[in-house]
Amino acid sequence: MTDTIAVDTNVFTAQLRKAAPLSELYARHIVGQRVAIAPQTVAEARFGALRAGWDPRRVTEIEGIIRQARVLPVDRSTIEEVAQLRHRCLRAGHPLHQSAHNADLWIAAGAIRWGLTLVAHDAVFQGCPGLSLLTELS
């Protein structure tokens, strides 16, 4: 997948708030790229809309940006990568092996499985074994 990047949930959903600091901070990494997202990102975005009680217009807006992205398929290789990555993180003492980071683990494993750089603004991805990460965090 040339010119495709994986995007974590917080950066992906920042598109809904055009003047949001994350949207502005990461625009240069996303504009002109094909965006891929994990199924977990779709679920997290939809849950956030439900929790916030968004009106139908805002729900339609989020569905629109989801349709513009490629949702990464979960295949046997992805499942194996999740297991392997969790084990590598456990051995390395990286927090992605912890249950609290299960969705992030799947997002990182999907990026690794499909050979994509992950664009994220979440420190939990820093130092993740085998992950190509693009972040504006210092």
Image: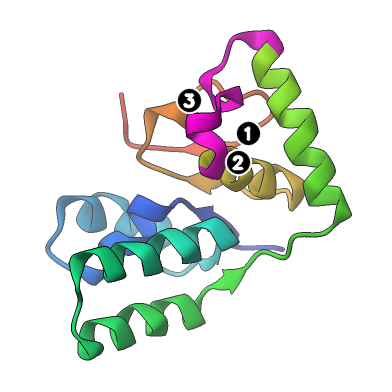
> Is 104 in front, or is 70?
104
Q: Secondary structure at mark 1?
A: loop
As drawn, 50 above or below 133: below
Q: Residue furthest left?
A: 19
The answer to which image quadrant residue 15 occupies is: bottom left
The circle drawn on residue 131 is 1
Q: Residue at x 39, y 69 (%)?
A: 46
Q: CA distance from mark 1 to mark 2?
A: 7 Å
Q: Secondary structure at mark 3?
A: loop
As drawn, 111 above or below 96: below
The three-letter code of the residue at mark 1 reads Leu
Q: Secondary structure at mark 2?
A: helix
Sooner in the amino-acid sequence: mark 1 or mark 2: 2
Find disc 2 in the rendering and name its residue.
108
Q: Residue at x 72, y 30 (%)?
A: 85
User: Local crowd at mark 1 within 10 Å, few (<14), some, or many (≥20)?
Assistant: many
Chief secondary structure of the magenta span?
helix
The three-letter code of the residue at mark 3 reads Gln
Find disc 3 in the rendering and name its residue.
126
- Tag 1 near tag 2, CB within 8 Å: yes
Instruction: Give the percent coordinates (x, y) of residue 59.
Output: 29, 82
- Over which residues does the magenta segment extend? 91-103
Instruction: Give the percent coordinates (x, y) of residue 84.
Output: 79, 30
- Tag 1 near tag 3, CB within 8 Å: no
Q: Is residue 58 left or right of residue 135?
A: left
Q: Is residue 128 magenta?
A: no
Instruction: Give the percent coordinates (x, y) of residue 132.
Output: 60, 36
The C terminus - image quarter: top left
The answer to which image quadrant residue 89 occupies is: top right
